[in-house]
Amino acid sequence: MAVSKNTHPPTPRANPKKKTPPKPDMEPDAPELPIPPDSSVHFPEVIGKTVARLYYVNDAPEDWQSLEVCFTDGTYFSLELTPRVDARACYEKMLSDDVEVIRDYGIIPGCAPGDGGG
């Protein structure tokens, strides 16, 4: 008994499936993130990206400071810090109703224009 092959192209669907945007990669057991205050600034371009490197730039002779977040896709997010910022850097984990400090890097001194410090 011979099996015939269907040589006709498939008929297009009347209602093709809509593509849904990918959800950000979250840890399987990650708690929900807190709701940011209304005064916060949102950066939707970075949602779901994988971080390759994070570093702080302090170019004292140029009076220029920046926090750089480099992603694995070759893009990066930069916060230029002006005119003077002292930042406390911490790596933390969200718990059910609290935050666990995994590592406290302490205060990173800022540099004001003209003081040459930092």
Image: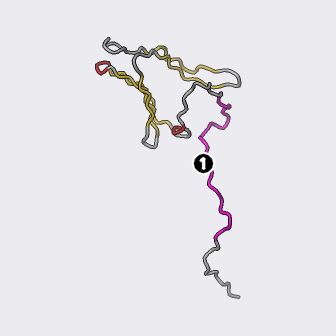
Residue pictured at 33% horizontal, 15% vertical? 113
Q: Is residue 92 magenta?
A: no
Residue pictured at 59% horizontal, 41% vertical? 24
Q: Nearer the viewer, residue 113 or 103?
A: 113
Marks counted in the figure total: 1
Residue that label 1 marks: 21
* Residue sitting at the far bottom: 1
Question: Label 1 amino acid?
Answer: Pro
Secondary structure mostly seen in magenta is loop
Instruction: Answer left or right for 54 relative to 7.
Output: left
Q: What percent of the width, then of the height, locates residue 111?
A: 37, 15
Instruction: Answer left or right for 51 relative to 19.
Output: left
Q: Quadrant of residue 63?
A: top left
The region drawn magenta spans 12-34
Q: Nearer the viewer, residue 38 or 113?
A: 38
Q: Residues within 10 Å of mark 1 (few under 14, many from 20)?
A: few
Q: Is residue 66 above or below residue 7?
A: above
Q: Nearer the viewer, residue 10 or 100?
A: 10
Look at the image and tell me in which quarter the N terminus lies. bottom right
Q: Is residue 26 magenta?
A: yes
Q: Quadrant of residue 65?
A: top left
